[in-house]
Amino acid sequence: MIKILLIISGCISLALGIIGIFLPIIPTTPFLLLSAALFFRSSPQLYHWLLHQKYLGSYIRNFREHRAIPLQAKIISVSMVWCTLVYCAITVTDVILLRTLFIALAIAISWHILSYKTL
Protein backbone atom coordinates (compact mmCIF):
# COMPACT_ATOMS: atom_id res chain seq x y z
CA MET A 1 0.00 0.00 0.00
CA ILE A 2 2.83 2.42 0.83
CA LYS A 3 4.55 1.66 -2.48
CA ILE A 4 1.38 2.57 -4.33
CA LEU A 5 1.08 5.87 -2.42
CA LEU A 6 4.73 6.66 -3.17
CA ILE A 7 4.24 5.92 -6.86
CA ILE A 8 1.10 8.08 -7.02
CA SER A 9 2.89 10.90 -5.17
CA GLY A 10 5.85 10.55 -7.55
CA CYS A 11 3.55 10.80 -10.56
CA ILE A 12 1.83 13.90 -9.15
CA SER A 13 5.22 15.46 -8.41
CA LEU A 14 6.40 14.60 -11.92
CA ALA A 15 3.29 16.21 -13.43
CA LEU A 16 3.89 19.38 -11.38
CA GLY A 17 7.52 19.41 -12.47
CA ILE A 18 6.52 19.18 -16.12
CA ILE A 19 3.93 21.93 -15.65
CA GLY A 20 6.70 23.98 -14.02
CA ILE A 21 8.66 23.92 -17.26
CA PHE A 22 5.91 26.04 -18.83
CA LEU A 23 4.62 27.92 -15.76
CA PRO A 24 7.44 29.84 -14.09
CA ILE A 25 5.65 30.09 -10.74
CA ILE A 26 5.94 26.33 -10.24
CA PRO A 27 9.52 25.13 -9.71
CA THR A 28 10.61 22.33 -12.02
CA THR A 29 13.77 20.91 -10.46
CA PRO A 30 12.48 20.40 -6.89
CA PHE A 31 9.44 18.49 -8.15
CA LEU A 32 11.59 16.35 -10.43
CA LEU A 33 13.98 15.62 -7.54
CA LEU A 34 11.03 14.70 -5.34
CA SER A 35 9.72 12.38 -8.06
CA ALA A 36 13.12 10.72 -8.31
CA ALA A 37 13.27 10.22 -4.53
CA LEU A 38 9.75 8.79 -4.40
CA PHE A 39 10.37 6.48 -7.36
CA PHE A 40 13.71 5.39 -5.85
CA ARG A 41 11.87 4.22 -2.73
CA SER A 42 8.95 2.62 -4.52
CA SER A 43 9.82 1.47 -8.04
CA PRO A 44 13.31 0.92 -9.44
CA GLN A 45 11.80 0.72 -12.95
CA LEU A 46 10.19 4.17 -12.70
CA TYR A 47 13.34 5.62 -11.13
CA HIS A 48 15.48 4.24 -13.98
CA TRP A 49 12.94 5.44 -16.56
CA LEU A 50 12.93 8.96 -15.09
CA LEU A 51 16.71 9.27 -14.94
CA HIS A 52 17.03 8.16 -18.55
CA GLN A 53 14.43 10.52 -20.02
CA LYS A 54 15.92 12.68 -22.77
CA TYR A 55 15.00 16.04 -21.20
CA LEU A 56 13.90 15.42 -17.62
CA GLY A 57 16.69 13.01 -16.72
CA SER A 58 19.38 15.61 -17.32
CA TYR A 59 17.76 18.03 -14.85
CA ILE A 60 17.87 15.39 -12.13
CA ARG A 61 21.33 14.02 -12.90
CA ASN A 62 22.93 17.47 -13.16
CA PHE A 63 21.39 18.69 -9.97
CA ARG A 64 22.16 15.52 -7.99
CA GLU A 65 25.74 15.23 -9.22
CA HIS A 66 26.77 18.90 -9.41
CA ARG A 67 24.09 20.90 -7.55
CA ALA A 68 24.06 23.05 -10.67
CA ILE A 69 21.58 24.29 -13.26
CA PRO A 70 22.42 24.66 -16.96
CA LEU A 71 22.89 28.25 -18.15
CA GLN A 72 20.07 27.98 -20.69
CA ALA A 73 17.65 26.76 -17.99
CA LYS A 74 18.65 29.65 -15.74
CA ILE A 75 18.15 32.21 -18.50
CA ILE A 76 14.77 30.83 -19.52
CA SER A 77 13.58 30.43 -15.93
CA VAL A 78 14.54 33.91 -14.77
CA SER A 79 13.21 35.49 -17.97
CA MET A 80 9.88 33.70 -17.70
CA VAL A 81 9.54 34.57 -14.01
CA TRP A 82 10.11 38.25 -14.70
CA CYS A 83 7.86 38.37 -17.77
CA THR A 84 5.03 36.65 -15.95
CA LEU A 85 5.25 38.55 -12.67
CA VAL A 86 5.80 41.98 -14.22
CA TYR A 87 2.82 41.32 -16.49
CA CYS A 88 0.76 40.37 -13.42
CA ALA A 89 1.94 43.44 -11.52
CA ILE A 90 0.92 45.71 -14.38
CA THR A 91 -2.34 44.15 -15.56
CA VAL A 92 -3.80 42.07 -12.75
CA THR A 93 -4.06 44.61 -9.97
CA ASP A 94 -4.04 48.30 -9.15
CA VAL A 95 -3.16 47.65 -5.50
CA ILE A 96 0.39 48.84 -4.81
CA LEU A 97 0.94 46.19 -2.11
CA LEU A 98 0.13 43.36 -4.53
CA ARG A 99 2.32 44.89 -7.22
CA THR A 100 5.15 45.08 -4.70
CA LEU A 101 4.58 41.46 -3.71
CA PHE A 102 4.74 40.34 -7.36
CA ILE A 103 8.07 42.10 -7.82
CA ALA A 104 9.38 40.79 -4.48
CA LEU A 105 8.40 37.27 -5.53
CA ALA A 106 10.25 37.71 -8.84
CA ILE A 107 13.35 38.88 -6.97
CA ALA A 108 13.19 35.96 -4.52
CA ILE A 109 12.71 33.33 -7.23
CA SER A 110 15.51 34.84 -9.33
CA TRP A 111 17.82 34.94 -6.32
CA HIS A 112 17.08 31.28 -5.61
CA ILE A 113 17.68 30.16 -9.20
CA LEU A 114 20.84 32.21 -9.58
CA SER A 115 22.23 30.99 -6.25
CA TYR A 116 23.01 27.59 -7.78
CA LYS A 117 26.17 26.95 -9.75
CA THR A 118 25.93 27.14 -13.53
CA LEU A 119 26.75 24.16 -15.72
Image (cartoon, rainbow, N blue to C red):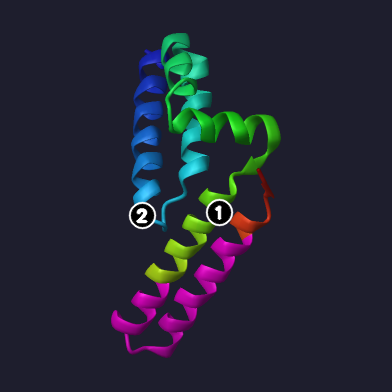
| Residue beneath disc 1 | 74
Q: Position of residue 77 (x, y in %)?
A: 48, 56
Task: Give the CA distance from mark 2 to mark 1.
Answer: 14 Å
Main SS type for the magenta part? helix
Q: Earlier in the sequence, mark 2 or mark 1?
A: 2
Mark 1 surroundings: few (<14), some (14-19) or many (≥20) residues within 10 A: some
Q: Position of residue 83 (x, y in %)?
A: 40, 70
Q: Quadrant of the C terminus?
A: top right
Which mark identifies residue 23?
2
- Left of 65 or right of it: where is 42? left
Q: Which residue: 52% across, 41% down?
A: 30
For this orientation, the residue located farthest to the left is 92
Element carrying mark 2: loop
Q: Nearer the viewer, mark 2 or mark 1?
A: 1
* Residue shown at the point (41%, 40%) measured from the top left: 17
| Image location of residue 47, percent across then percent down | 47, 17
Q: Residue 70 location in percent, x, y?
A: 59, 45
Q: Which span of residues is magenta-colored?
A: 85-111
Tell me: residue 110, above or below residue 88.
Answer: above
Using the image, determine if residue 11 lies above or below residue 76.
Answer: above
Is residue 35 placed above or below 29 in the rendered structure?
Answer: above
Q: Is residue 92 magenta?
A: yes
Q: Residue at x 64, y 31 (%)?
A: 64
Give the amino acid at mark 1: Lys
